[in-house]
Image (cartoon, rainbow, N blue to C red):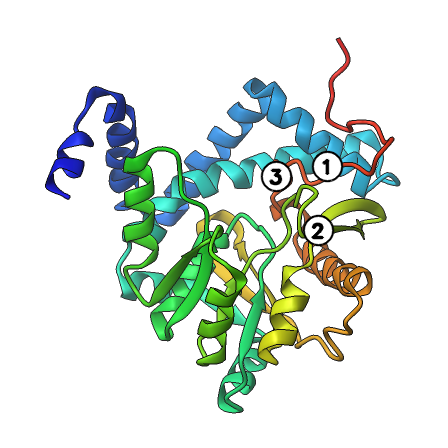
Amino acid sequence: MRRSRRALLHPRYWPGWAGLVLMRVLSWMPLPLLAFLGHGLGLLLYALHAKRRHIVRVNLQLCFPDMSPRERARLARRHFRGFGQALLDIGIAWWGSEARLKRLVRFRGHEHYEQALREKRNIILLVPHFLGLEFGGFRLSIDRPMITVFRHLVNELLNLAMVRARTRFQMRLVEHIKPLTALVRQVKTGIPLYYLPDQDAGRRQSVFAPFFGVPASTFFVLPRLAGMTNAVVIPCFTRQRSWGRGYEIVFHPPLRDFPTGDPAADTTRMNREIEQCVMESVEQYFWVHKRFKTRPKGERDFYKQKN
């Protein structure tokens, strides 16, 4: 272990160290100031990062074809403003005190979660990728043990920092390559699962289910987990409040009659629930992700740019 830590002082990790130091410094700043700076950073990224700007534009065009190009452009700029703020805020999530996080993050619809806890139900939180995602996981893990799935980062330094940050309260991490039974065992003990199922799933353990009317490669792990653990599934998402006033975790009512045992029907239902979350704060969904990257055979690549 000591040798491993010494290896992290190698020059190839220096940019990572610089980034962590910057995150730590930013974590001491007030959130309204970070929001102001982050909005500027986001607009700069919108202007300079052509690849991500293209991805966002494609996603918005696919999901909201009835919007005018001008409306979608305004929505894309608002998304990048929030994205810039999320980049600067993350240090607060990683290092902010328990008291500060409790002060910054409020709840809406928390009664749905509380009722399931009172009834001692096994719980899976269906968590779409929103810009406030990190704050939601940290805030909820202050109150009670939770479990979530993570991917090991290639950069060992950043991976170590991420794991230490995310486990500093009561969050337990399970690497995504672990068998499903590792999650099943934990959920059956009554530990809520903070589960993010809405990124492109490739062609393994997935089905094509409509997302805003467009076939999207979708993991069908959530229905299997819910069935194997007899868990109640509660959609929730975390969004930024305007101009650095904090964050809000929004809980929706639990899914009824879920799962049904039909992978196509269950993943379609899941995506429909995510759509409802998105429509409450459209600009804060993670549009920079290639949600429609994997296509049914014979379909074109939506993200391929013309030369």
Q: Amino acid type of disc 1? A: Thr
Lower position in the chain sequence, tag 2 or tag 3: 3
- Vertical side of 157 occupied by 49: above or below: above
- Name the residue that disc number 2 marks: 206
As drawn, the residue found furthest toward the bottom would be 119
Horizontally, is 28 left or right of 41 in the view? left
Write the residue at 68% across / 49% down.
Answer: 282
Picture quadrant where residue 89 is located: top left
Q: Amino acid type of disc 3? A: His
Write the residue at 74% across / 21% down.
Answer: 304
Q: Residues within 10 Å of mark 1 (few under 14, many from 20)?
A: many
- Name the residue that disc number 1 marks: 294
For the residues marked 3 and 1, what is the alpha-carbon distance in whole angstroms?
23 Å
Given residues 260 and 276, the one toward you in this image is 260
| Residue 245 can be seen, yes or no | no
Given residues 134 and 307, the one toward you in this image is 307
Q: Which of marks 3 and 1 is in front?
A: 1
Write the residue at 48% across / 30% down.
Answer: 40
- Name the residue that disc number 3 marks: 79
For the residues marked 1 and 2, what is the alpha-carbon distance in whole angstroms?
11 Å
| Secondary structure category for the residue under label 1 | loop
Q: Amino acid type of disc 2? A: Ser
Horizontally, is 4 left or right of 127 in the view? left
Q: Nearer the viewer, mark 1 or mark 2?
A: 2
Looking at the rendering, in which quadrant would you find the N terminus?
Answer: top left
Horizontally, is 302 left or right of 223 in the view? right
Q: Nearer the viewer, mark 2 or mark 3?
A: 2
Given residues 305 and 238, the one toward you in this image is 305
Picture quadrant where residue 300 is located: top right
Write the residue at 78% across / 27% down.
Answer: 301
Lower position in the chain sequence, tag 1 or tag 2: 2
Mark 1 near mark 2, Cβ–Cβ under 8 Å? yes
